[in-house]
Image (cartoon, grey):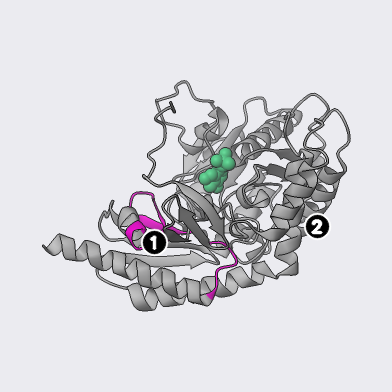
């Protein structure tokens, strides 16, 4: 028996191909959520399948007691696409953020700040381990006592950060998502990110950008901060990096990365040959097939046509960046996900009232049209039932 920590839909998928999934009964679905931004290359991508197969036939795991050439190769690739200097590999987004938080503390201690604080953002999400949950929901009582050292401020509000800097001498870092995913596809304006960067430089704060959901091409660049021309000190990535093979990474600039001296951090599975081989295949495919550009282009198409065809008084706003799209509803429609499912469409509802679309980067215009049609039908169904 499973612990009851998930609210699952009554559906069992047996196979996938591209943007399509089929269930046990042979019904087909258009996948507009990609396992929560994980399967960026879609399902059963031949390059990823071949990489996994090749590696499984040779070597799955040796541990970080030894050099792992595939890890070094993947690190070099990640460094070259991100502008960061060094990489620590782990197995999830939460773990990548844990590493980031630890690096901040090491860095602050080195500077004589023994009780460093990290600013995090309201409606942000950084994971469910104790440290990342403390950054996400510092006031949550379920797991009290949470980790101390986090101060939350409103997102995309530079004055709140300025006020926090004034009031907290021990502030050491800021963590934020360039687009808040779980928080309802809230997009930080580019000038906000550059203003945060400036304040961090001015007050000697580290900037951690959590790109766990927005990274690996999803917003139309490898990493979303690349739209704004700034660089973080620490960046975290996971989800789509392995297209379904668990892998996460924390990247940092040299001076910060070197603080992880032997023994200070680690992971048994982190960066094992299987995960690294899969991630290399993912990054090479995105590059070869120009999928960052594709995500930008098809994202624009999807957004424009959603706005054209879906606007109704029940929709407050449709917003997106690349293939992170949110449809904010004017009222609560908890049934929208199950109604869309009847039409063979997989979507997700987040922050209570935002329909979230995170399709594979390989989505075609025809598939985007089909998703909009199915979504319109689902909305029409719900509205009809409301009036009845
Ligand atoms: N950061 C962000 C921005 C996320 O969206 C998520 C997952 N939704 C996480 C961190 C946590 O990742 P994981 O579930 O892989 O630990």
The residue shown at (79%, 32%) is 260
Mark toward the viewer: 2 or 1: 1
Is the C-beta separation of discs 2 and 1 under 8 Å? no
Is residue 162 rendered magenta in the image? no
Quadrant of the frame with the C terminus: bottom left
Check the image and report above or below for 264 versus 73: above
Q: Residue 288 at what x, y percent from top left?
A: 75, 68
Q: Residue 122 at what x, y percent from top left?
A: 45, 45
- In the image, the segment drawn in magenta is 341-364
Is residue 342 rendered magenta in the image? yes
Query: Where on the image, by quarter, is ligand 1?
Result: top right
**In-front residue for pair 382/178:** 382
Please give left or right for residue 345 compared with residue 49 in the image.
left
Check the image and report above or below for 340 versus 147: below
Using the numbered discs, state the Cα–Cα distance from disc 2 to disc 1 in whole angstroms: 39 Å
Local secondary structure at mark 1: loop
Q: Which mark is residue 80?
A: 2
**Which comes before the other along the chain, label 2 or label 1?**
2
Q: Is residue 82 visible?
A: no
Specify few, some or many for label 2: CA neighbours under 10 Å numbering under 14, 14-19, or 20 or more: few
Please give left or right for residue 344 compared with residue 241 in the image.
left
Q: Which mark is residue 75?
A: none
Q: Which residue is mark 1?
A: 344
The residue shown at (70%, 70%) is 290
Local secondary structure at mark 2: helix
């Amino acid at each position: 028996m499973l612990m009851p920590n998930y609210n699952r839909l009554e559906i069992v998928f047996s196979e996938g191909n591209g943007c399509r999934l089929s269930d046990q009964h042979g019904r087909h679905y258009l996948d507009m959520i990609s396992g929560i931004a994980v399967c960026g290359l879609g399902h059963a991508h031949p390059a990823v399948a071949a990489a996994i197969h090749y590696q499984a036939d040779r070597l799955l795991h040796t541990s970080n007691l030894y050099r792992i050439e595939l890890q070094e190769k993947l690190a070099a690739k990640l460094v070259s696409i991100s502008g960061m200097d060094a990489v620590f590999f782990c197995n999830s987004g939460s773990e990548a953020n844990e590493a980031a938080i630890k690096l901040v503390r090491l860095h602050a201690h080195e500077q004589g700040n023994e009780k460093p604080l990290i600013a995090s953002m309201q409606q942000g999400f950084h994971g469910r381990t104790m440290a990342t949950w403390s950054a996400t929901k510092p006031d949550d009582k379920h797991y009290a006592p949470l980790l101390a050292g986090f101060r939350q401020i409103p997102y995309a509000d530079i004055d709140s950060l300025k006020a926090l800097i004034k009031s907290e001498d021990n502030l050491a870092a800021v963590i934020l998502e360039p687009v808040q995913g779980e928080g309802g596809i809230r997009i930080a304006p580019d000038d906000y990110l550059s203003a945060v960067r400036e304040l961090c430089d001015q007050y000697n704060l580290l900037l951690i950008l959590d790109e766990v959901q927005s990274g690996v091409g999803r917003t139309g660049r490898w990493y979303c901060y690349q739209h704004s021309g700034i660089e973080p000190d620490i960046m975290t990535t996971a989800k789509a990096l392995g297209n379904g093979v668990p892998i996460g990474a924390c990247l940092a600039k040299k001076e910060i990365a070197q603080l992880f001296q032997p023994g200070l951090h680690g992971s048994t599975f982190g960066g094992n040959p299987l995960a690294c081989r899969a991630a290399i295949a993912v990054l090479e495919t995105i590059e070869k097939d120009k999928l960052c550009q594709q995500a930008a282009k098809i994202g624009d198409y999807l957004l424009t046509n959603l706005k054209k065809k879906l606007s109704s008084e029940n929709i407050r706003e449709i917003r997106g960046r690349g293939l992170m799209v949110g449809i904010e509803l004017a009222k609560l429609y908890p049934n929208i996900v199950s109604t869309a499912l009847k039409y063979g469409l997989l979507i997700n509802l987040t922050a209570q009232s935002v329909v979230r679309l995170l399709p594979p980067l390989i989505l075609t215009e025809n598939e985007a049209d089909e998703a909009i049609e199915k979504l319109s039908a689902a909305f029409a169904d719900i509205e009809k039932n409301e009036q009845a």
